[in-house]
Amino acid sequence: MTKRHNVFVSYHHANDQQYRKKFEEMCEDVIVSQSVDIDDIDPDLKTETIRQKIRDEYLRDSTVTVVLIGKQTWQRKHVDWEIGSSIRQTEYNPRSGLLGIILPTYTRPEPGKYYIHTVPPRLYDNVERKYAVVYDWSDDPDQIQEWIHEAFLRKDKIEPDSSRPLFGKNHTGSEWQ
């Protein structure tokens, strides 16, 4: 049996809350959720304070970050910050594994494909580096547990790409450049 992992779920709170809930309910026997709930963090705090709270209060004990990818997830500064903090090795916060899961609401160019400029750019950088993998949504918790464990194993074998500047604000438009 594969080990349970502490999983941080990063997602677009306004659009994809129902999928985060479904993901956590479906996987409750194979993961321990470490995620931020809506209204957990005061949005009026300074940017660096929000980043620090995410890193120190939510990501600290996680071993893998799962990014749920809907059609606007790539635009969210918090998703970018969460990915950035997840892949950073610090004295107090070890690096996490990373993977993305394409939600059923995501608009595809064709089955099994995704537009590279409509997934979070920092996640895409790490797919290119082979630090992360993007999968299609699955209702099979055993399959998801396998993906999570593979991400956990990759984190110590491949150096992540954290070269992209962090988002300063949410982005708009249909894709990133």
Image (cartoon, rainbow, N blue to C red):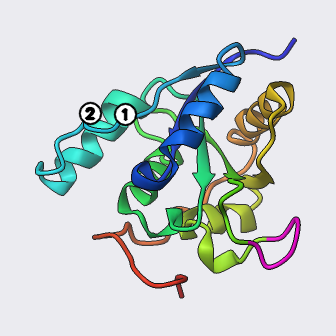
Closer to the camera, 104 or 48?
104
Give me the disc on residue 106.
none
Marks 2 and 1 sit apart, C-alpha to C-alpha, by 5 Å
Residue 154 as seen in the image, left or right of residue 164: right
List x then y, in percent, for residue 162.
Answer: 52, 62
Classed neighbour count for the residue bearing mark 2: other residues with Cα under 10 Å, few (<14), some (14–19), many (≥20): few
Q: Which residue is mark 1?
A: 37
Residue 89 in sight from this viewpoint: yes
At a point 34% along the width and 70% down the height, the residue shown is 170
For residue 103, above or below residue 36: below
Q: Which residue is mark 2?
A: 40
For residue 60, above or below residue 105: above
Residue interval drawn in magenta: 108-113
Closer to the camera, 159 or 111?
111
Residue 51 as seen in the image, left or right of residue 110: left
Residue 92 in sight from this viewpoint: no
CB atoms of marks 2 and 1 within 8 Å: yes
